[in-house]
Amino acid sequence: MKTTESMRAGFWNRSHHLDRMTLRELWIAYFQYPAIIAYLAAAAGAIGVWAWRPATPVQTLAAMLVATLVYPLVWYCLHRWVLHSKWMWKSKLLAPTWKRIHYDHHQDPNHLEVLFGGLHTTLPTIAAATMPIGYAIGGIGGAAIAMATGLITTCVYEFFHCIQHLAYKPKNKWVASIKQRHMQHHFHNENGNYGITNYFWDRLFGTFYEKAGERPKSPTVFNLGYTQEVAERYPYVSDLSGGVATGHPRKRQNG
């Protein structure tokens, strides 16, 4: 079952699974991952643009605050209505993107290489979500600092996302709580708990659930509704994946 692109050279020439890693190994892997390096480099560049064309202190703080506050809403909307959509797999053009950015992750939730989003999708999204607001607040400097805030926030989100899939029991109650919510999303019912570190919008839109018993077990929690029957009509994802996998990912790996 093909779940990702060919492995990169060096550290990334082999597969990494978070349920088999320690926290120390995650820290090492995290800061070597190309996407994280790219986010941090882009954030440094954006801060450089802000230093070149700075907004006022008030504008700068406002742009950073708004970018931080809008991020959870943008993530919620994208996660619920794009990543969990049933329209992307119908398009031969969009199916490869949907497979890469989310289907593979739900097929094998602990596979580190497909946990991170592809830069060709994440960077434009971060820019679109932050820069117009930042520009409206503080011109070029405001746009740049808002973009930097979005990039750094993405790094924070991605790290906590890794923690949520890591074979690690957090001592912090808040971290343990968000880990539990996310595990329910992946292993019980995917139609809820769309947040990563913030479940405010889930609560507001009625998609939050505290305990697994509050919702029935979803038969599509691992395939997101892309079943064999769907694949017969829309084969694009199946063709790229070598078929449609069924059952629990760990059982498939052990088999």
Image (cartoon, grey):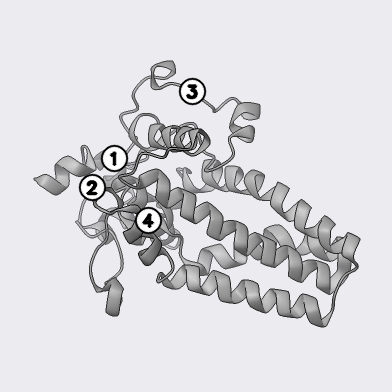
Q: Amino acid at mark 2?
A: Val
Disc 2 to disc 3, C-alpha distance: 31 Å
Disc 4 to disc 3, C-alpha distance: 28 Å
Disc 4 to disc 2, C-alpha distance: 12 Å
Q: Residue at x 61, y 57 (%)?
A: 153
Q: Residue at x 52, y 64 (%)?
A: 121
Q: Amino acid at mark 1?
A: Thr
Q: Amino acid at mark 3?
A: Glu
Disc 1 to disc 3, C-alpha distance: 28 Å
For disc 1, the marked residue is 227
Q: Secondary structure at mark 1?
A: loop
Taking the view exactly as shown, the residue that stands out farthest to the front is 171
Task: Tell me the number on the disc at residue 210.
Answer: 3
For disc 4, the marked residue is 99
Q: Depth check: give the residue in front, 51 or 79.
A: 51
Of the image marks 4 and 1, the number of the one nearer the N terminus? 4
